[in-house]
Structures are given as C-alpha cells and as structure tokens.
Amino acid sequence: MSTNHTQQLTEQDPFFNEISDDDPQMNKNNPNEFHAQPYDMDKIGFYFSDLDSYNAGVEASGAEEFEIQFIDGDDCEIFKACGIDQSNLEQWFDDIEPLDHDEKTALFFVLSCLGYKLDDALNIYGDASIQQDNLKDCASQFFDECYSQDIPENIRFYIDYDAFARDCEIGGDMTEFDYQGFTYTCTNSNGL
C-alpha cells in the first residue's frame, strides 16, 4: 500500500501554515519554490522558499535526509547546473540565489559549458564576458571592431562572417549557449 506523503499535511499540523499556498509570505521576496522530499517514506515532505523555512521544515518533519526538488520560479536552469542538494543548499541561498541575472548567466555558462565544479565556478564566473547575442553577430562585431578599418570598403562585402564565427568557435575563443530562453555568447571562452 503506497501513499503520497507529500500532500498529507492538514490545518491541524503545526507546520501547515508555514507552507500553505495561501501563505502571503510564500514567494513574497523570493520567486523560487522548492520541495524537500524525505528519503524515509514514512516522513512527510514540505515546501520551502528560503533557508529558514527549510530548517523549520526539517525540524518539523523529523527526517534526516532529503531530496531537494526545484518546483517553481525563474532559476530552474541554474539550480540544476549547480547540482544543488541538501549538502550545498545553504550555499544556494547565500551565494547563488542573490546574484543578478547577468551573474547567473555567467555562472551557468562556466558550469554547463566549461564543466567547472560549483566552488571553482563561483570563483571565476565574474571573468566571463557574456553578450546576449548569437555567435555570428558577436564574431562579426569583433571582426569589424578589430579588422575592418584595415580593409578597403569595397572589399568588406566579401568577408565571410559565418566562416570567421565558425573559426572563433572551433578555436574556443567564443562559445554560444542558451539560458532561460535566450541565446548568449561568451567572447572569452579560452581565457577561463
């Protein structure tokens, strides 16, 4: 006999009001919502949106180990790329969630495209030069800024920007990636 222990809380449970969907504090300052599912199936899981509500849920549930699930919000891709679990959840709330969109984009790139571990990525993501544009447009802009002034105007029309962009990508100088539905290009991939 299998029961779903996730939705078993009632209004009589002391932790009910802290995780109820009607709670005006839920997602007030934080757009992300998580769920802690105990590995002990006799225990009840709980929703949380910050470290304090997580700690209160852990105490109320009586379980020791949890699977941390991203439920709703804007940061699903970065949460997954960071490999957030119970052991580094505090690092998520302290170091990652407060980052602005550009910083999260750079961190996502360093984790997902370059394969850095989370602690190392947190030390170098600020060095990534990220532009919200596709590889060809970034490569074309770079070419124009660096080389166009040396090429006669009547010859500029024959420049193969696709080939230049491909060379930048193959050489590791530039890397195109998608994050949260937008296309970005890191223009200093080799430097990281």
Image (cartoon, rainbow, N blue to C red):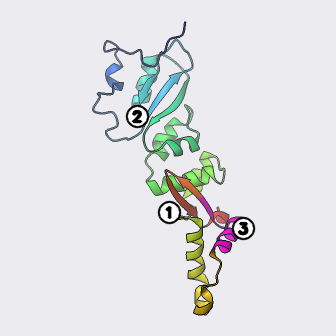
Res. 17 in view: yes
Q: Where residue 182 appears, x then y in whole percent?
A: 50, 56
Pointer 1: residues within 10 angstroms few (<14), some, or many (20+)? some
Which amino acid is tagged 1?
Gln
Q: Which mark is residue 171?
A: 3
Region in magenta = 162-176
**Disc 1 or 2, which lies upstream in sequence?**
2
Q: Secondary structure at mark 3?
A: loop
Give the label, 1 or 2, closer to the camera: 1
Which amino acid is tagged 3?
Gly
Q: Which mark is residue 132?
A: 1
Instruction: Look at the numbered discs 1 and 2 and tell me whether their residues touch, using CB distance below 8 Å.
Output: no
Instruction: Look at the numbered discs 3 and 2 and tell me whether their residues touch, using CB distance below 8 Å.
Output: no
Q: Residue at x 47, y 44 (%)?
A: 75
Q: Secondary structure at mark 2?
A: loop
Label 1 to label 2, Cα distance in Å? 29 Å
Q: Residue at x 34, y 19 (%)?
A: 16
Instruction: Look at the numbered discs 1 and 3 and tell me whether their residues touch, using CB distance below 8 Å.
Output: no
Q: Residue at x 60, y 72 (%)?
A: 139
Label 1 to label 3, Cα distance in Å? 20 Å
- Asked if residue 144 is positioned above or below residue 124 in the image, the reply reads below
Which amino acid is tagged 2?
Ser
Q: Nearer the viewer, residue 163 or 146?
A: 163
Residue that label 2 marks:
49
Lateral position of residue 163 relative to residue 135, left or right: right
Label 3 to label 2, Cα distance in Å? 42 Å
Pointer 3: residues within 10 angstroms few (<14), some, or many (20+)? few
- Asked if residue 153 is positioned above or below residue 63 in the image, the reply reads below
Q: Quadrant of the C terminus?
A: bottom right
Lateral position of residue 162 relative to residue 44, left or right: right
Q: Where residue 26 appears, x then y in whole percent?
A: 33, 33
**Disc 3 or 2, which lies upstream in sequence?**
2
